[in-house]
Image (cartoon, rainbow, N blue to C red):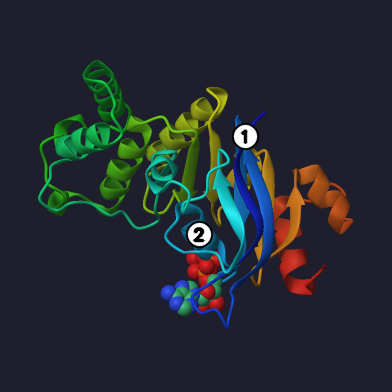
Amino acid sequence: MEEVLKVQTLKGGYQRNKPVLHEVDFSVSSSEIVGLIGLNGAGKSTTIKHILGFMEPFSGNVTIQGRTFLNDPETYRSSYTFIPETPMLYEELTLKEHLELTAMAYGVAEDDYKKRSKKLLKEYRMEKMANWFPSHFSKGMRQKVMIMCAFMVSPPLYVVDEPFVGLDPIGIKSFLDHIVSLKERGAAVLMSTHILATAERYCDRFILLHDGEVVVSGTLADLQAQTGLQGASLDDIYVHVTKEDVR
Ligand SMILES: Nc1ncnc2c1ncn2[C@@H]1O[C@H](COP(=O)(O)OP(=O)(O)OP(=O)(O)O)[C@@H](O)[C@H]1O
């Protein structure tokens, strides 16, 4: 397995004299789903912003396939897709135009675009809405547009922030099935979520952030061993670690 994303001793945040992230270290390899978990304010979104290249590290670095954002911003940006918690759509473009724009921006061939868009519209039950504008979409439908755009392209890394908010159970199932098939095709997936039962079921490894530090990380068995909680669920481990400040 190739290490696709590498976060190395990352110190970062919004003000240099008040870092939010302290020496954050982890990696995500190909064919792997890694869960980024932690309480509100733990630093998950800040970590993601550093990964996406929206924020610059104070020290340490973030690489995707060995490249930093500053080395080569264009290649770096095209090596991931990001599914944000809050859908960001172009109000003047229809659903179909969103898919077209994404395919164009990532250089997806015409034939692939046609095949993929047809499949995605069907899978997410949005065929009837292909020519609708975002102002007519429900919250979940807006989220589905973002997800469909992300799945239109096939970069080595997917970064997903709280994907389940607003999705109905069928939407969640389609999303998770899709993530699993991407993993099987060799993609690296970093997924931030508060839905721990789902994370436990789908993620191969976990990074538990607390106050901007990685408190424990590894497979569920690793976390159980590190916390001394044999047989515990991710939920139990999370509560234990965040309550007792185990380090
Ligand atoms: N734009 C900002 N400017 C200054 N500080 C910020 C900003 N955004 C977040 N922070 C601070 O950074 C810290 C980490 O926040 P972050 O948004 O990364 O947490 P999170 O783990 O994503 O939380 P949640 O689960 O609530 O989304 C918090 O102390 C927060 O107050």
Residue 32, x across and y down, in percent:
62, 34
| Residue 112 in sight in this render | yes
- Determine which of the numbered discs, if any, sits on residue 32 in the image: 1
User: Badge 2: few (under 14), some or many (20 or more) residues near its Cα, within 10 Å?
Assistant: many
User: Badge 1: few (under 14), some or many (20 or more) residues near its Cα, within 10 Å?
Assistant: many
- Determine which of the numbered discs, if any, sits on residue 50 in the image: 2
Residue 110, x across and y down, in percent:
21, 20
Residue found at x 45% / y 53%: 52
Q: Is residue 56 above or below residue 165?
A: below
Amino acid identity at mark 2: His
- Determine which of the numbered discs, if any, sits on residue 153 in the image: none
Disc 2 CB within 8 Å of nearest ligand 1 atom: no
For the residue pair 226 and 159, the one nearer the viewer reads as 159
For the residue pair 75 and 30, the one nearer the viewer reads as 75
Residue 210, x across and y down, in percent:
67, 68
Q: Secondary structure at mark 1?
A: strand
Residue found at x 40% / y 48%: 73
Q: Is residue 98 left or right of residue 36?
A: left
Quarter holding the C terminus? bottom right
Amino acid identity at mark 1: Glu
Quarter holding the N terminus? top right
Disc with the residue nearer the chain's start (2 vs 1): 1
Q: Secondary structure at mark 2?
A: helix
Disc 1 CB within 8 Å of nearest ligand 1 atom: no
Residue found at x 82% / y 46%: 222
Give the Cα separation between the discs numbered 2 and 1.
20 Å
Q: Is residue 162 above or below residue 107?
A: below
| Residue 196 in sight in this render | no
Q: Residue furthest front?
A: 71
Q: How many marks?
A: 2
Q: Quadrant of residue 5?
A: top right
